[in-house]
Each structure stands twice: as C-alpha cells, then as structure tokens.
Amino acid sequence: MHHFKIDKLKFDNQYIIRFKGLKEGIHNFKFAINKEFFMKFDALEARDGTVEVIANLIKRSEFLTLDILIKGTVEVQCDRCLEYFNYPIEYSSILVVKFSENSSEQSDDMIILNPNDNELNLTHHIYEFISLAIPYRKIHPESADGKSLCKSDMLQRIREFEVKQDEEAIKTNWEKLKYYFANNN
C-alpha cells in the first residue's frame, strides 16, 4: 500500500510548476505525456499517446500568465471501424493565475491561488486540454489516394447492413406525413 502512495505522489509531482523563487520574466517548462498519464485518466477518450506540453510562464509581481501548447499524437478508437489509431492533436491556451484569499472569481482560463501558495499543479488542466483537442467524431484519415484507412472487412460489413431507400419510397413517406397533418388538425 505504501508503494502505491509513492507512485501516486511521483505522478502528481510531474506536472507541477514551482514559481516561488523565480525572477520576474519568462520561464519555459516542458512536460512529456505518455501511457502512464492516459492510464490515470481512464475517462479520457485516448488510451495511449505521446504528447509534449510546453508551458511558457510569464511571472509578474501581481499575477502569472501561462501560454500552453499541447502537441503530439493520441491513440483513439475509430467510431466507424472500432480499430485504434494514432490521431495527431494540437491545442493552445492561455491561463492567468491570480493570487487572492477569495477563490469565487475563478473561471476556465483563470486560476485563483492563495497568496501563500508556491506551486501550480497543471495535471488537471493538461487532462482538460487533451480532452478538448480530441474531436467528437474520430475516424481514420484517408490515404493519399482518397481511400479510407478503416479496417476493410468492417467497412464491408457496414455496407451490408446499410438501409437503402430509393427516392420513390422517401416521396411516399412525405406524402403520408402531409396527409396525416392535413387530416388531423
């Protein structure tokens, strides 16, 4: 059990920026995201990936600004053929960190820290940014010649189960709906 706590602390400490003691100005940080990160966040639609996070911190006496760029590939499941594939992602965001005893003014792009805090844990923000970079619909890209890279046997099965309606059947259904609304009002 003790080993689990050490591993969790080691993971949580990977994405922390310690800003106390830094001089005012620009400071650059890089974080590597790998399978361990994706395993910790099983709600994330990616099960693996190689992502680099670049955080450029601008420290001022009253607040901090973080310009964050996330770039890499994540392994996601194709919504069409259900096979996993590597999907390239890129996302950028700006976070403003203010110091206050009152945390009620916090928002998506503003973090309020206590004036006594000396570090910022970016783990949750990285998770959110990767989530936002993954599209709602994930489908294999097409090859250079315009063909789907989806698993061909699955595409064949999909074609077999497609319901094909001819234009006459659609026209007949519209006529039925028009008749129904005309006689039931």
Image: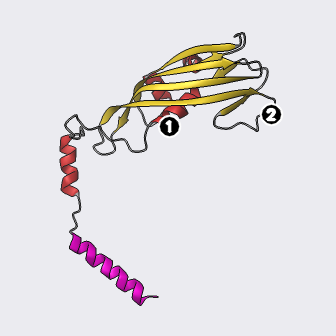
Q: Pointer 2: what residue?
A: 102
Q: Say above or below: 131 vs 115.
A: below
**Magenta residues (range):** 167-185
- 181, 41: nearer the viewer: 181
Which numbered disc flags the more N-terminal residue, 1 or 2?
Answer: 2
Splitting the image into 4 quarters, where does residue 124 fall? top right
**Helix, strand or loop at disc 1?**
helix
Left/right placement of residue 15 relative to residue 118 reads left
Q: Is residue 158 above or below residue 145?
A: below
Residue hosting label 1: 132
- Residue 180 painted magenta: yes
Mark number for residue 123? none
Residue lying farthest to the front in this orientation: 25
* Image side of residue 17 versus residue 131, left or right: right
> Is the Cβ of the residue at disc 1 closer than 8 Å to that at disc 2?
no
Disc 1 residue type? Answer: Leu
CA–CA distance in space, label 1 to label 2: 28 Å
